[in-house]
Amino acid sequence: MARLAPSLLVASLALGGCAVVPIATRNLATLTSTPARVPHKIAQPLRADARLSVLWVGHATALVQLDDKVVLTDPVFTETVGQVSRRLVEPGLEPSALPPVDAVLISHMHPDHLSLGSLELIEPVVRHLALPRGGLTYLTDFSFDAFELGTWETWERDGLRVTAVPVKHVGFRYGIDAEWMLDAFTGYVVEYHGLRVYFGGDTAYDERAFIETGRRFPGLDLALLPIGPAEPRTFMRKTHVGPEEAVQVFLDLGARRVVPVHRDTFVNSNDKPGDALARFLAEAKARALPPDAVQVVGIGEQRVLIPRAP
């Protein structure tokens, strides 16, 4: 099977020029390191005791169980992305441990979110894959069903509903395609059996988009929100919420719970591992979020958010 091999460095330079040179340099240094191990990985992630659960694999990859349906966000299981960025921590779940996945959600085309090598690893268990508009251009020849969704468009199978919702990011993959890939990015809301889960992918702050999503999907049970990359803020705020802004996104959405992701997996900012989470928690405390609203899940950890009734 053919595999595209984009350069994360080229894409980063297209976004910010010299602002990302220190980040790229740190990434090159990781190529000689070994990702930290995740002890006691979960071998059977399907939970009979859960209506809603989340297992964080790392970065923006999360396995979400909604009753008997399984959704996987931006799957990245490879040791490197974009050829120049190596994981700081290995994936929190082995691809071989994945149950059948009803829907894979791809938020945008960057290689740390659309990982073609990872899709090859998990292809046998993937049933359907959603991409934003233009995303099929970058997909190689896979056996699963793949489709595009524009903003507010919905796909449904067997009661599982996936709706593309607006975010603020960039859609190119190589840098040279920035001129025409103007809207190949999205967030998603997943609905099943009355459960509602929001996945933000990558996004800058856009008050109108988040408030409108919350209005159309009231009572979100869970928001999977990126809280990094954080620094340098003057550059990152164009395409990424920082930890403090992520708290405001949660409030705008009106969600009941938030799991902070997109942190501590790759070197993609000037802040150190743990910094973004510490800032997010401090802001959540300052804004008086209820203690059970913030669900901090570690890489390889699974959390039952809504248990199944006995």
Image: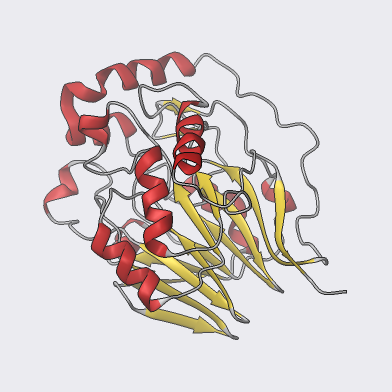
- Could you say which is closer to the camera, residue 23 or residue 135? 23
Q: Which color scheme did the rendering employ for the protein?
A: secondary structure
**Percent coordinates x, y for residue 238 in the rendering:** 21, 42
> Can residue 149 be seen at all in this image of the molecule?
yes
Residue 262, placed above or below residue 168: above
Q: Residue at x 29, y 72 (%)?
A: 151
Q: Residue at x 32, y 50 (%)?
A: 203
Residue 69 placement, left or right of 173: right
- Could you say which is closer to the camera, residue 129 or residue 260? 260
Residue 293, placed above or below residue 278: below
> Can residue 200 be seen at all in this image of the molecule?
no
- Could you say which is closer to the camera, residue 116 or residue 191? 191
Count of marks overlaid on the render: 0
Residue 163, placed above or below residue 134: below
| In the image, farthest residue toward the right | 310
- Could you say which is closer to the camera, residue 130 or residue 187? 187
Q: Residue at x 42, y 47 (%)?
A: 247
Picture quadrant where residue 106 is located? bottom left
Picture quadrant where residue 306 is located? bottom right
Residue 240 placement, left or right of 75: left
**Percent coordinates x, y for residue 310 in the rendering:** 88, 74
**Percent coordinates x, y for residue 191 in the rendering:** 54, 76
| In the image, farthest residue toward the bottom | 158
Residue 91 placement, left or right of 2: right
Residue 309 placement, left or right of 287: right
Q: Residue at x 52, y 14 (%)?
A: 32
